Amino acid sequence: MGIKERKEREKKRRRNAILNAAKRIIRQNGVEGMSMNQVADLTELNKATLYSYFSNKDDLIDAVVYDGLVLLEKELEKSDQDPGPGLQRVLNLTGATFDFYREYPVYFYALNHQERRGPGAERGTPFSVKGNEVASRIFDKIRENIKRGIEDGSIRREVNINRLLVLFFSNTYGVMHTVLAKEDVYVDVLGLNHEEVERSALEFLEYFLEGRQKQ
């Protein structure tokens, strides 16, 4: 192995170490409780080296979100193998998204922080651009299955696909925020569990989309 290859491997190793440290801190303290100083301490890297990989905390969070979206896309590919009608495929994608963020909540915490940035926040970082590209592919997959459902009659024809994509994001985002952050409400106050919350969200989406009246 040449010098160039060794340098690239070391660079990749350090990047992964920084990302893993950030995810570990986010799991323990939340995004707001993570600082670049903590990441530097955990990775035993000096601040100058850390900032040569990620320009600031938001850049690092964007990288965490990007990694999560890459993994989510792979999981959705697995869940989209059903040859059934478009409606079922959309529901499968929604359920797989619930499963993913419940299994890997650190990615949702990072996404939640990213979504709550103010209108003046920098949104054109390299990792945010790459993340948007992955998110666009995910939405294209959902769009394709909505079209499939409209064509096969499992989704009603008058559905506006763009509005539905907004609803899809709002639905999954809101449900996961509830499941991960509001357990004291849906468990202690309402006597529900996360399976019931997620199942009801899927039923709500199915009722909205269905092209034929249930008997």
Image (spheres, rainbow, N blue to C red):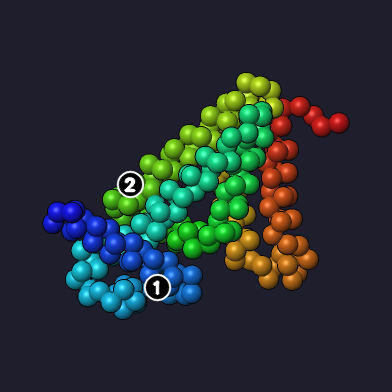
Secondary-structure class at tag 2: helix
Residue position for label 1: 34
**Amino acid type, callout 2:** Val
Q: Residue at x 86, y 31 (%)?
A: 215
Closer to the camera in the image, 203 or 103:
103
Q: Quadrant of residue 146?
A: top right
Mark 2 neighbour class, 10 Å CA radius: few under 14, some 14 to 19, many 20 or more: some
Image quarter (top left, top right, bottom left or bottom right) of the N terminus:
bottom left
Q: Quadrant of residue 78?
A: top right
Q: Is residue 36 visible?
A: yes
* 215 on left or right of 12: right
Closer to the camera in the image, 16 or 28:
16
Residue position for label 2: 129
In the displayed structure, 114 sits above or below 184; it is above
Closer to the camera in the image, 198 or 46:
46
Q: Is residue 160 visible?
A: no
* 107 on left or right of 127: right
Measuring from the top left, give residue 94's x and y in whole percent: 61, 44
Q: Residue at x 48, y 40 (%)?
A: 138
Secondary-structure class at tag 1: loop
